[in-house]
Every structure is written in structure tokens, then in C-alpha cells.
Image (tube, rainbow, N blue to C red):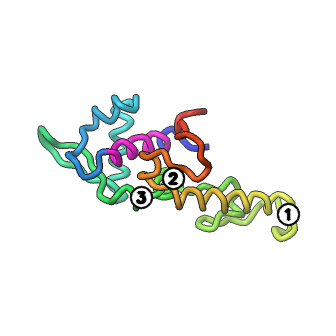
Amino acid sequence: MLSKKTRYAMLALSVLAAEYGKEPLQIGRIAKKEKIPQRFLEGILLMLKNRGMLNSTRGKSGGYYLLKDPREVTLFDVVICFEGSVSMLACVCEDQYMPCEFCKDEGSCPIRKPFSEIYRHIIDILRRTTLSDLVKGQFDNDRSKPCLLSE
């Protein structure tokens, strides 16, 4: 399950993606539009800035803006920034693999195979879904835009 920080980051980034190429957005405007506590959002945007996804300007017309085209920023980038991994089991995670403490033999583990497949599907979807897709509401499964805050 994604943390609130990750979901808020996706919501804030979708607002910034919708305004890509325009004037920087003030943090208060983003917070109000997505109903994100401003103090919490400040830390999230700072993390994204430190990761090179955003930049900011100071002053009366200052605010935050995307450094990359929204078509180039994937949900995978965002999830990894805040979650570190998307795997439910460390023994199937490619980027942060850890041997399973419960398996005698990973090759014959009945749990590992389905979770490996789940992991591959999740990675595939996150890598091909961009901020631009969030803004346009375009998804391969033809469903409406998902609520990133549903529990």
C-alpha cells in the first residue's frame, strides 16, 4: 500500500503537470486544490526538488514547477522516490533483492512465483504511466481516473 506522502506527491505532481510550461505554482494553491496540509506538502515538494523533478522560484510570482516534461516523469519515479521499492516481498525485488528468510529453496517456493509476476506487472504499469497520463486520465484499462487517496 502506498503511503500518504507518495499519494500526495502524485496529486501535487499532477497539478504541476497540468500547468507545465506556465508560471510556477505557489505551494498554497497546490495544497488548497488537492486538500493537502501545506506543511506536509512543503516536505514532499522539497524531496521532489532534491530528486531533480522540480525546481522553485522565490518572490511574489514564485512557486514550484516541473523540470521535465510530464511525459517523461513516470509513476515509478515517484513511488521509488518515496517508497524505495514496489515489491511486497524482498526476494522478488530486482532493485533491492534480499533472500527470503522463510524459504529453504527460492526456486521451489510456492509463494515467490505469483508475487514475482505481480511485481513485474506493477513495475510495467508504473514505468509506462506518466504524469501526463494522470492529467489526461488516460489508462490502458479504460477505467476512469483512480482516486489516489482511497484507502
Q: Chief secondary structure of the magenta span?
A: helix
Identify the residue under disc 1. 109
Local crowd at mark 3 within 10 Å, few (<14), some, or many (≥20)?
A: many
Q: In this rendering, which labeled residue sits more in front, label 2 or label 1?
A: 2
Identify the residue under disc 3. 73
Quarter of the rendering occupied by the C terminus:
top right
Residue 110 horizontal side relative to residue 74, left or right: right
Which residue type does callout 3 highlight?
Answer: Val
As rendered, which of 12 and 111 lies closer to the eye?
12
Residue 30 horizontal side relative to residue 58, left or right: right
Residue 61: x %, y % from top left = 14, 40
Label 2: element kind: helix
What residue is at 46 percent from the left and 51 percent from the top? Answer: 133
Mark found first going from the N terminus, 1 or 3: 3
Which residue type does callout 2 highlight?
Answer: Val
In the displayed structure, 109 sits above or below 151; it is below
Residue 144 horizontal side relative to residue 100, left or right: left
Magenta stretch: give its range: 7-18
What residue is at 55 percent from the left and 56 percent from the top? Answer: 126
In the displayed structure, 143 sits above or below 54; it is above
| Image mark for residue 40 | none
